[in-house]
Structures are given as structure tokens and as C-alpha cells.
Amino acid sequence: MRQEIAVEKVAASLKGDPIVRSIFLKGSMGRNEHDQYSDIDLYCLVDEEEEGAFLDRRLDHLRAYKELIFYDDIFIIAPQIVAIYEDWLHIDLFTVTAKTIQEKDFFTVLYDPDNLMEKYNDAQHLTITKEAFRDSVLDAAWFLFQHKKAADRGNHTWAPEMLRHSMRNVTNILLARYASERALLGLKTIHRDLPKGKQDKIVGIYEKMTPSQHMKAAFGIASILKDELQWILEELSEEDQQAGSFMSLMVGVVLNRVGSESL
């Protein structure tokens, strides 16, 4: 596939850069789960004091594959070039140091002459932390609340948007239960990681996230959460039970409200 060709050519250029200490892949290619539509999450590890000099050369390395039709220089978790090629391939080139490297997700090492990546092997994971799980529980309920306010106001464009925010967190919760070792992948991979019945319910909910049917979507979200509620409450620590209580409240409110209307 063109992804492998692009990685080979760009990595070959990067290996010739004396500042580059290690090169590795994350994302779907790092997990060897990519397909012809996948983008490339390519990482370079450099020493902090030499980062600035390397940043000035990133575009030259990226052009070792093909000419770019678009690029953007951004900073999210680290300096990052978003690059799109004339064949529509997309590479995200991240520049990390020992201080900014993220110890999550799995990676595939392409170049590491000093074995610098070896110490991160045990940190490879896609499991969700207790704190992140609590936040997903809270946010799933919070955006059901925001949906209720938008629906009460009669804002039928904003209401389904609130449900989309809720569903992103609902899928995190479902993954934490049914595919805990891959929970950080989120909504993008439910087609691979959730039971078929759960996938079908989620698709059905998204089909109803429209100005005219969002109340049905809200009912679907609340129904999924009701099915999982006992497990969710058991997973929360004593200190986090307020998030569970809020979720229980919002599930009841949505089911009682929509259930009393014609679906």
C-alpha cells in the first residue's frame, strides 16, 4: 500500500538527519491495523535542545515521498505537521522529546540505534484510567442535560449536537466494559471492538440525530445507559459516585420524558 511506501521514503530521509534519535509509528499503522484509507502517525524523537533546528527541516523530510498539496504547522500534544499529498495520503509528523513523549497507545519502532524506545515498551496500552472513565460518565450525563435544555428551548439544531457529544462518551464507557484493552480508541473503532448488537444500536441512534428525530436518539442513548447502569455504578469509586448519581438521574429523566410521548 502507498502508506508503506510513504513511510519507507520519509523514514529514509529522517534517518539521514543527525538530530533524529528515534523514529516510530503510532495509530493504526503502529498497531498494524491500517488499511488503504488510514493516515500515518509518524513520530520523531529528538533531544530537547535540538528540537528547534529539526523543526525547520520537517517539510524537506516529508517531501521525500511526494509533493505536498497542503500542510499546517500546529501544536496539540507536540509540534506537529499535518501534511496532505497529491495522492491524498495524509501524514501527521510529530516531534517529541523525552519530556513530551506520550506513554500510551502501541508503537512500531522504525529506527532506534541507541534503544531509546525500549524503556517505553511496558507503557504501551489503550486502557482507560479510572479518572477518564469517571469523566466519560459525567460528560455522557452532562450532555444529555444540555440536550434537554436545547430541546426545551426548541433549538432543534443544537439539540442533536449535544447528543453527539454525549455519544462520544457513551462509546468510551461501552469500550471500557466490552474491550477494555482498546478503550482509548473511542468511537472510531466501535465497528471492530464492540459486540454487533451494541454497534447496531449506536448506528440507529446516529441515524436519529436530526432536528426532527433527536428525541428518539436521546431515548436510545438513555436506554443503552440503563442497560449498563449497574455495571457503571460498580466501576466508580466512592468519591466518584456523584457522577453515577447524575447519570442515573438523567437516564430516568430522558426515559420518563420521551417514554410518555409518542416515539
Image: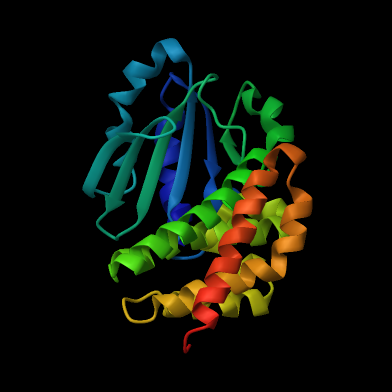
Vertical order, 222 against 83 (above or below)? below
Q: Tell me the quarter of the picture where residue 175 sits.
A: bottom right
Residue 248 vs residue 16, the one in the foreground: 248
Q: Position of residue 122 (x, y in %)?
A: 74, 34
* Displayed quadrant of residue 88: bottom left
Specify the farthest residue to the top. 49
Residue 25 position within the rendered picture, expressed as x and y whole percent measured from the top left = 53, 42
Q: Nearer the viewer, residue 96 or 19?
A: 96
Q: Is residue 245 above or below residue 171?
A: above
Protein image colouring: rainbow
Q: Do we see residue 262 in this rendering?
A: yes
- Give the residue at x 36% y 35%: 80
Residue 122, relative to residue 83: is it above or below?
Answer: above
Point 41% across, 63% down: residue = 147
Q: Residue at x 55, y 20 (%)?
A: 98
**Farthest bottom residue?**
262
**In this rendering, would 104 be left or right of 78?**
right
Q: Position of residue 2 (x, y in %)?
A: 42, 59
Q: Is residue 190 visible?
A: no
Query: Residue drawn at (52%, 51%), measured in percent from left and top?
Result: 139
Image coordinates for residue 104, horizontal then vertical, percent: 62, 38
- Work out whether residue 154 or residue 175 is closer to the camera in this orientation and state it: 154
Q: Tell which of 101 and 145 is nearer to you.
A: 145
Task: Give the number of marks.
Answer: 0
